[in-house]
Amino acid sequence: MISIALLSIMGIAAMLTPREQWAPVIRGLAIVTGLAGIIAVQMDGYFQVFGFRVTQLSNIWATVIIALLIIFLMVVPRSQAVHRLRNDHIALLLFSTVGALILARFNHFITLFLGMEMVSIPMYVLAAQTHSRRSIEASLKYFILGATATSIMTFGAALWYRSSLSFDIPGPVVTQPIGLIGIVLIICALAFKLGLAPFHFATPDLYEGSPTSFVGYMSSISKVAAAIAFFKVGTLFPSDSWMQIISIFAVSSLVVGSFGALRQQSVKRLMGYSSISQAGFWVILMFNSPISAYFGFAYGLASLLLFWVIDCVEEKTHSHTLTGLLEQDTLLGITAIISLISLTGLPPFAGFFGKYNSLTVVIDNGHWRLLAVVLAASIIGASYYFKIIFQIMSPPESSCKLHVPFLSKCEIIKI
Amino acid sequence: MVTDTMSSIFLYMILFLPLTGWLLASLLRRTTHRIVIWITCATVLGSFITSLIISPKLLDGMVCNAKLINWLSLPGYRFSLGLMADKLTLLMMVMITGVGFLVHMYSIGYMADDREKNRYFSYLNLFIFFMLFLVMSDSLIGTFIGWEGVGLCSYLLIGFWNTSPANIAAASKAFIMNRIGDIGFMVAMGVLLAAISTLNYSEIIAHLPDLLTQPTILFVVTLGLIIAVAGKSAQFPLYTWLPDAMAGPTPVSALIHAATMVTAGIYLVSRLSVLFYAAPYSAINLLWMGIATAFIGGVAAVVQFDLKKIFAYSTVSQLGLMVIALGLGQVKFALFHMLMHAFFKALLFLGSGNIIHALHGEQDIRNMGGLAKSLPFTATAMGIGALAMMGLPPLSGFYSKDAILEVATHHAGISYLLIILSCLTVFYLSRTLYFVFLGTPRMSTVTPHEGTLSMQIPIAILGFLAVVGGWITHNLFLAPGIEISHLQLVITSLVIIGVIAPMGFAWAKRQLHDHENSPRVWSFFEILYDTFAVKPYLYLSRMLSIHFERQVAAAFNGFAQIASVASWGIVRLQTGSIGSVVLFMVVAIALILLTVLGKFI
């Protein structure tokens, strides 16, 4: 709990610091606080107070979250639009992270609600920071849909309470229909936060419209937080219903994400759809949480780095096409290629183990139809990730747009 | 089994110094050549010295182990990579790093005018790392990683001068031919994994009693490995890539395509020799494969006019001889010959590098001649190398070759085959020497001169080893139990050399006399391969591309079209209007509720 307190105090301090010149100092302090937070997490024993339950698993989650925050703060956000990281940006990021930490440890609906809103509300603000029409539209849409989701969640909680007379998560497994309706509503709201189809509609717009620096944060830390909540609420379901829910979300996300990404022109929007597909893989892992923590870190890190690269490119060239990046800036190019290969799920990199474990879960449980979808999604995923890699490695002078006609023959054979 | 920290550290140093060299060289690609050359040479030398430091321990019969990583664990299987060093590994390590260092040093002079020196040296270091990994791994899987790695480096270095399409074609050919062998390797690994669920060398050997009860599995495993050996060590059906591999820089041919990489197959068989000798038919397969290879290589070398290709075919032939020794059950003799071959063949290649360097890229021996006068040092060195290879007592080749010959006398017909083979060797070598060094100069304009000091020192060292190497090391390989009747063999060798060498000279003279009349001499086997392998292959691939590949492509395009339509539909869903999105969400929730609560209705 010391880590939550530390980050909150740091957030308040950042918010109250009047001078903009101090922003680099504040950022440095935030990184130091994060490191202290990680140490504090390691020193926390396992205990339980009202609303919170600290276990080994929750500590792993908390470490992942803070580690991602530190990495995010270290790779400088430098969007054109957000000329530099301001004090209040840092404060918002810290508050949002505190929300994520709460989500790592909640054992009560009230703390779930609190954490979820603490993660989300700073996102609404950060999404609008470009002050462009697109950015404000994305933020507003995300806000309205987010509010809808929250209200659905609250309504679901009421129904759930009526049947089980308890707000404990994990609590007794719900079997009555009325309670089941309640937790399905909660799960649907959380699926929205995680960006799962069919509740994915805000995601592509959000990824495209928001300042690129913050998309890195949204695609990593807030996703990890939502995934934890999703997993924990899932323990309330009877196991057969839980499997049904997971299959529905996994199949629809994999289909929507993969096919949606296939025709996108802009890297950011493509990554939006790809995040839906990745969430599909992730949700399959919800049977087995420690692995899903690992997946969270692998995925979060890869997309954080990729958005950092896009951000750097945007700053230099005022556009986010990555064509010819490898020749112009070898380091950025290699980083992007490694992130993309990791997202594709090829062996030497972290992403492989995540995908490998999802496949194992599916095979062990014998869901052969789901397996077919997962495999198809992986193949299509490879095709669009490799399209970006191809662009990065192609020579800069051929200023071909992100996408030539459409999946030309050679591309699909390359898979 | 020893895992003490000191020897682990030594093993890590031996393995990772060249890798560090490669990393630094790649990172400092843009800096001056001098730094890169220093780094790469120093790391390989360091690796060599470390191997020497650890050698007394290993010669005492100790086996050192060092852990690397747990690579992958699947239910029932664990693949961990580790290092292991014993006498066999020591031999390979010393040979790889020693010859490797000499070739690095030689390359400083040879590649002096090349603008991409840094790339060249970094590839060389990467090659040495992978080759060391191949021989130091404690499991087949690690060896396979090294096996693929050296294949890659060989590809990169054959095609090093990548502006000429012919070089790239040669590089691709080497790579593809090796892939055929790799399939054998992978099949062997798969079968072994299915049978005893381990690929660790010591565990495989511990499981030998189990395997002995399943001769079919043992046969398939060894057959797969023999195919792999045929690919990497250029044996009979798959040897054709090696002569083409001469497109690379000459020092590379000396290091990779004569002394080290092509001996990987010999190493593999030696490492698992108990498996090969326990399996039905494997030894005899090796024996016949070796005989076929040795003869094809020897015959082809007789009719070649390209200096490097002569030595390439000669390498093929000598590798065949090593495989014959393996087939006869004499692992030690095969290794002995491998080491001696590394000395004299590297010497011959570096010598021909000198000649090619002096003649500015000329490789056709018909355009040489009389070079003994202008290049006396190279002529002496190559003369020594050739004599060692012919088996003149007491040079290095005599010990190893005649040890094999001695064993063969117990196998009636084979000893005669080997004597014929020796005659062939003497014949093509003397022919080559006549063409290059004797007679009248036939060069167009250039005045040849010897290379720099950094090119001469490695040649001098190798020449020294080619002379005394056999005498120094023969006690290590020839067990005291086996008596070699020296006198008889000495006489045989002298007679062979005395009789055949003049014949070689005479034939060379005659060829020179009428070489204007026959512009291109086709080797019998080239014609054979062209009619029976290359043309049918091209025909098959053309037919496949016309009838099959288009269908496949059409099928793929069909999938792509379906994906495209689906993608269009999904993107259409994204209308951007909040009202419709919320409506959609509500419908989705209703549907999910219906699915989950279906059982209550």
Image: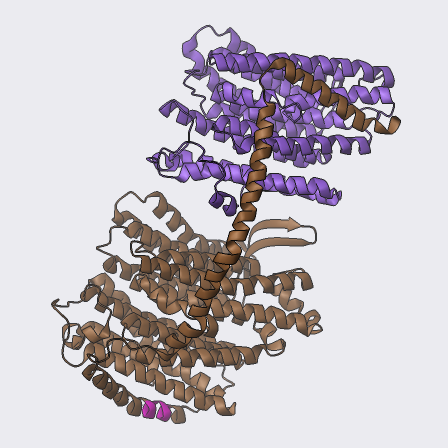
Chain colours: A purple, B brown
Quadrant containing the N terminus of chain B is: bottom right
Would residue A399 be found to the left or right of residue A36 on screen?
Answer: left
Residue at screen point 57% across, 27% down: B571
Specify the quadrant of the image occupied by residue A107.
top right
Instruction: Give the x, y percent position of residue A112.
Output: 71, 18
Task: Please tell me whether the stretch drawn in magenta is mainly helix, strand or loop.
Answer: helix
Confirm whether residue B139 shows in the render.
no
As displayed, is residue B274 above or below residue A72?
below
Question: Nearest the camera: B467 or B543?
Answer: B543
Specify the quadrant of the image occupied by residue A193.
top right
Quadrant containing the C terminus of chain B is: top right
Residue B494 included in the magenta stretch of the image:
yes
Instruction: Give the x, y percent position of residue B600.
Output: 88, 26
Instruction: Give the x, y percent position of residue B558.
Output: 56, 43
| Magenta-colored span | B490-496
Question: Nearest the camera: B231 or A11?
Answer: B231
Residue at screen point 56% across, 73% down: B273
Confirm whether residue B257 shows in the render.
yes
Question: Nearest the camera: B394 or B539?
Answer: B539
Residue at screen point 84% across, 24% down: A174
How many numbered discs sit on the rendered protein? 0
Would residue B592 be found to the left or right of residue A298 on screen?
Answer: right
As displayed, is residue A391 above or below residue B469?
above
As displayed, is residue B448 above or below residue B467?
above
